[in-house]
């Protein structure tokens, strides 16, 4: 499948997964891949601590939109832009847009939003999702990538619209919830991309999250991203002493034992990830995109481009979508 076709299938990609699986890194890589395919992309984070700015080598950003990766390169790349959405900022903008600018800041500074949130659970999430819906509807970018909260909160976050529809019978909150739910359940407008590591607990949580989102929210699920895969390679069963002798090299004391231990770890890791990939495929019949483990403690723009290269190749291997 052509990457441009893949990313044009829905105007909003929601990236979700268990904390620690690399969800924000995958969000950055998806955004960069889409931009390299010519689609202007806006990345939205909702918790303000995803590290997206660092991944693009840029200063931290807030509610105001910034450019993380400018377009116009030799390959025809488009911009990757980003902003953070918070309930307070979304409420300020909503009230200002409805002629209540003078009281908006007083309401948020007084803690009134927290009182309302206690009385109507999900109101903070619907404020953020309502702003996302506005961005998607206005077409501020060809693609909006939402770096969602970690898996547990992601379910309640995306379920908030349906919950408020059940709890609120009339008024602007119900209207907002209905509009958000309409967006979430329309596959031409929204897809959820779930991210996991090739390990038992993250895979279990991803499968549980997938069924919860389908059953309780009604979202369309895109391919699953299996992140941080060790490359499979031969030579892991070779005796280090024999290999060194064959290469005409000498090993220092303890090096043979360390090399053998590293080979055992690598064999166990690759066997585990193969088992978990197969188990995931059996439990969840969705296409998979595989991303490599990057041996770096501080990922940056070069690493995001490396992952974008892999994503482009993986997406090209997917079956093309049927014509609508």
Image (cartoon, rainbow, N blue to C red):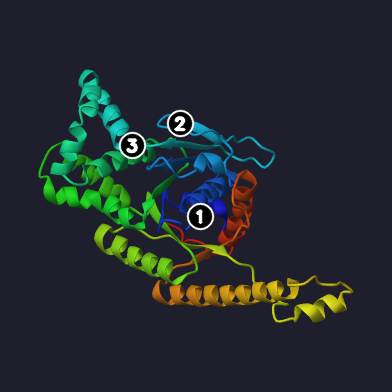
Q: Given contact means CB atoms under 8 Å apart, are the residues at marks 1 and 2 in contact? A: no
Residue 170 % position (x, y): 11, 41
Between label 2 and label 3, give the one nearer the viewer. Answer: 3
C-alpha distance separating marks 2 and 3? 13 Å
Q: Given contact means CB atoms under 8 Å apart, are the residues at marks 2 and 3 in contact? A: no
Q: Which mark is residue 244?
A: none
Q: Which residue lies under the disc numbered 2?
A: 65
Residue at the (52%, 51%) spot, across then down: 25
155 up-or-down from 259: above or below: above
C-alpha distance separating marks 1 and 3? 29 Å
Q: Is residue 15 left or right of residue 311?
A: left
Q: Is residue 144 left or right of residue 300?
A: left
Q: Which residue lies under the disc numbered 1?
A: 6
Tell me the SS state at disc 2: loop
Q: Is residue 196 left or right of residue 79?
A: left
Residue density around tag 2, few if under 14, some if 14–19, many if 20 or more, within 10 Å: some
C-alpha distance separating marks 1 and 2? 25 Å
160 up-or-down from 198: above or below: above
Residue 5 % position (x, y): 52, 53
Residue projecting furthest to the top: 102
The mark that comes first in sequence, 1 or 3, is 1
Between label 1 and label 3, give the one nearer the viewer. Answer: 3
User: Can see residue 90?
Assistant: yes
Q: Which residue lies under the disc numbered 3?
A: 86
Look at the image and tell me in which quarter the C terminus lies: bottom left
Residue projecting furthest to the left: 169
Residue density around tag 3, few if under 14, some if 14–19, many if 20 or more, within 10 Å: many
């Amino acid at each position: 499948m052509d990457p441009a076709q893949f990313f044009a299938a829905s105007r909003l990609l929601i990236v979700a997964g268990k904390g620690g699986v690399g969800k924000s890194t995958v969000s950055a890589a998806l955004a960069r891949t889409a931009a390299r395919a010519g689609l202007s992309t806006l990345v939205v984070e909702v918790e303000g601590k995803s590290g997206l700015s660092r991944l693009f080598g840029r200063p931290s950003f807030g509610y105001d939109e910034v450019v993380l990766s400018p377009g116009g390169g030799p390959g025809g790349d488009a911009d990757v832009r980003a902003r953070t959405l918070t309930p307070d900022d979304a409420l300020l903008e909503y009230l200002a847009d409805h002629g209540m600018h003078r009281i908006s800041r007083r309401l948020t500074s007084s803690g009134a939003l927290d009182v309302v949130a206690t009385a109507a659970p999900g109101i903070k999430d619907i404020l953020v999702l309502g702003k996302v819906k506005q961005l998607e509807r206005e077409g501020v970018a060809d693609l909006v990538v939402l770096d969602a909260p970690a898996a547990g909160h992601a379910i309640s976050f995306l379920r908030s619209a349906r919950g408020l529809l059940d709890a609120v019978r009339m008024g602007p909150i119900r209207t907002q919830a209905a509009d958000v739910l309409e967006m979430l359940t329309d596959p031409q407008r929204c897809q959820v991309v779930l991210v996991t590591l090739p390990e038992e607990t993250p895979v279990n949580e991803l499968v549980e999250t997938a069924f919860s989102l389908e059953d309780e929210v009604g979202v369309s699920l895109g391919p699953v991203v299996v992140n941080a895969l060790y490359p499979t390679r031969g030579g892991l069963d070779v005796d280090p002493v024999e290999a060194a002798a064959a290469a005409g090299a000498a090993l220092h004391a303890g090096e043979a034992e360390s090399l053998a231990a590293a080979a055992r770890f690598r064999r166990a890791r690759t066997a585990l990830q193969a088992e978990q990939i197969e188990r995931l495929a059996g439990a969840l019949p969705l296409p998979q995109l595989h991303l490599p483990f990057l041996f770096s403690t501080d990922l940056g723009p070069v690493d995001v481009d490396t992952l974008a290269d892999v994503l482009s190749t993986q997406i090209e291997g997917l079956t093309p979508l049927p014509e609508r």
